[in-house]
Image (cartoon, rainbow, N blue to C red):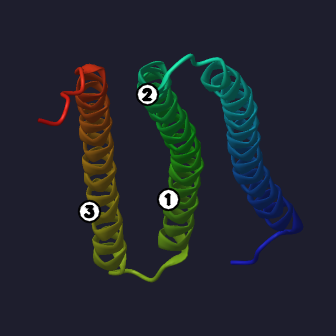
Amino acid sequence: MYVTPEQIQAANKSNVEAFLAVANAQFAAFEKLANIQASVVKSAFEDSIANTRALLGAKDVQEFVSLQNSFAQPAVEKAMAYSKGVYEVATVANAELSKVAERRVAEWNENFVSLLDKLSKNAPAGSDVAVAAVKSMLAAANSAYDNLTKVAKQATEIAEANVAAATESARGLAKQPKRAAA
């Protein structure tokens, strides 16, 4: 059995498309992260200017301390929002890369089964058992891969739920009034 130029061209095209899909997913993630970073830096700069002006306008030490304490809540909320934004970008990028990998695995399996079918047609008598064994191993590997993918998705969902719960818990702690030292 020979490899035809059309098969080589199709394989090259598939490889380039997979590479471009990965590159696009990574670039989109990088762009989103850069936008988040720029937004955070701009917001932090604007907040520091506003906070400094407010502190300079304080009439006494108690007002100064009160103002400083009031700056903590928005800062914590912004830090949580930043973390959540970065986590969402990472999750989306991971999902995109997983889709590309799943397509590549499915394509490889399809090509391998096709190759096995072609080989079995030209194989000597009695080799049906060996071809069936290879197909059975491939099916078992695919089943294991599917199970692993399902477990990874479940772990991701659990992690997302834990992040959401931790975020809510942190928000609750940040909103609690601070007690004065006795």
Are the residues tagged 3 and 1 within 8 Å (C-beta)?
no
Which callout, 2 or 1, points at the residue further toward the start of the chain? Answer: 2
Residue at 55% across, 59% down: 114
Return the disc, 3 or 1, that comes first in the chain's sequence: 1
Quadrant that contains the N terminus: bottom right
Q: Give the number of the disc on residue 65.
A: 2
Task: Determine whether the residue tagged by mark 3 lies in a helix, strand or loop.
Answer: helix
Identify the residue at image location x=58%, y=55%: 104
* Residue 34 percent coordinates (x, y): 75, 42
> Is residue 47 positioned above or below 134 on the image?
above
Front-most of 119 and 124? 119
- Depth-wise, is mark 2 or mark 1 nearer the camera? 2
Residue nearest the viewer, comparing 102 with 166: 166
Q: CA distance from mark 3 to mark 2?
A: 66 Å
Number of residues whose C-alpha sits closer than 10 Å to that of mark 2, classed few (under 14), some (14–19) or many (20 or more)? few
x%, y% of residue 50?
69, 21
The amino acid type found where label 3 is placed reads Ala
Vertical comparison of 166 with 98: above or below: above
Tally the numbered discs: 3
What residue would you read off at disc 1?
A: 109
Residue denoted by label 3: 140
Left or right, residue 10 beside residue 141: right
| Spatial separation of the CA atoms under disc 2 and disc 1 | 66 Å
Of callouts 3 and 2, which one flags the residue occurring earlier in the amino acid sequence? 2
